[in-house]
Image: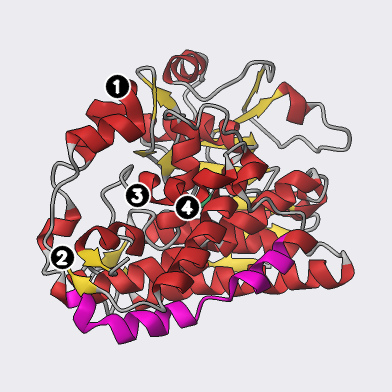
Amino acid sequence: MIFDCEQYAGLCECGRDHELETKKVVVEYGALDHFEKYMQDVGLGSARRAVVYDTFVYNLPGVKHLKADQEIVLESKGLRAEDVLIEDMMTKLDSPEVIVAFGAGTIMDFGRYPAYKLGIPFVAVPTLASSDGFTASICSAIIKGQKKSTRMKAPALVVADLDIIKGAPMRLVSSGINDILAKYVSLADWKIASLVSGEDYCEKIAGLAEDALVTMRAAADKMAATGEIDHEAMTMAQMKSGLTMQLWDNSRAASGAEHLMAHLVEMHPPRFENAEGIHGECVGVGTFAAVKEYKRLRKLTPKAKKFEPLTGEWVMEKFGERLYDGIMKENSNDILATFDPQNIIDNWDRICAIIDEIPEPEELEALYKACSCKYLPEHIGIDPELGNEALYISAAIRNRLTLIRMTRVLDFGE
Ligand SMILES: [Zn+2]
Ligand SMILES: [Zn+2]
């Protein structure tokens, strides 16, 4: 399957001019056999090329190495995406005109970062499809000692060879399913936020995220029923979701209240010291908790409540001293203060209709079980008692409007 992305770029009905660096996404068995043709298609056929691997991928049995003007093979043991390591690699580059990153997420940052710094294109050859970061422009390398998401370069071309991707361990397949089923919540959050606060919203980009969700749901249903894994559909769903982040210039379509669970796990605040899981697993736990809570809230009748900023006392209690400053700073211009809470009440029927489109928790639970997905707090080392609270604590991690965050200006009479 080849996805021609350019139909999504350019001036849109939403009023924005969507920029897209990615010209083509190829997801096929044997895709690497035609790699040179795809490079030509995007105008990079004769560009001087550095290809970056790690030793693990480079030595995988049956992996075909690409034609290269320069090959860089990084020691995979202890390899992490960190600015000092990436810049050290950059000193070895022999004036490339394009960088091809061949590997998993870490290696992508060894393509994305230098390409951005050098102002040249980068091409992604992913060997896994367990999350939707490959087609995005977000670099998650540690920069100046801090792990954060920095906007850098998106790949001009993505060539995902399913002969390699199909070898990924089951745990990563399940994690990938979780990362896309999360869109049930993230899309609902975006729609609700635009209704009540007037936040910008784009039908076309939400439609692309929805397309990724529908594709993944169908593949997950098939896997649940037959045990068969449709790598092509699952990989393409990841690619499309990543493109929404590039087109919208942030992760709005792909990440809502549910994704903050993954951030919470990474941050290890008090009481969550033992939380542990790969990205999609934590997101699955966040999704299931959010779906249950949205369905519960939907049955209630809220009243508007005056906005109050988060108190330092609450932040200290939930996040502890180490994380206190960062959380206070993130919430210093709270999005909740920018609109009248009464808007939520006035739109409550429409919000309920949006929540009704999300599958029931029982339906999701059956699917998660059948696809070996993680979805309960205890699956990622969180005390089950803290599951719902984790949803509310994590809402403070990012100043983004979600239904969970909105409950701070709602009185449910509970
Ligand atoms: Zn648009
Ligand atoms: Zn994700």
The amino acid sitting under disc 4 is Asn
Q: Which residue is mark 1?
A: 321
Outermost front residue: 414
Q: Is mark 4 within 8 Å of ligand 2?
A: no
Determine the residue positioned at 20% across, 43% down: 331
Determine the residue positioned at 23% across, 69% down: 200
Residue 353 on the magenta segment: yes
Q: Earlier in the sequence, mark 2 or mark 4?
A: 2
Distance between the Cα atoms at labels 3 and 1?
18 Å
Q: Nearer the viewer, residue 391 or 249?
A: 391
Front position among marks 3 and 2 = 2
* The quarter of the displayed image where residue 77 is located: top right
The amino acid sitting under disc 1 is Glu
Visible in this render: residue 231?
Answer: no
Distance between the Cα atoms at labels 1 and 2?
29 Å
* The quarter of the displayed image where residue 339 is located: bottom left
Q: Which residue is mark 3?
A: 395
Determine the residue positioned at 43% across, 24% down: 142
Q: Earlier in the sequence, mark 3 or mark 2?
A: 2
Q: Nearer the viewer, residue 134 or 328?
A: 328
The amino acid sitting under disc 3 is Ala
Q: Which residue is mark 4?
A: 388
Q: Earlier in the sequence, mark 1 or mark 2?
A: 2
Q: Secondary structure at mark 4?
A: helix
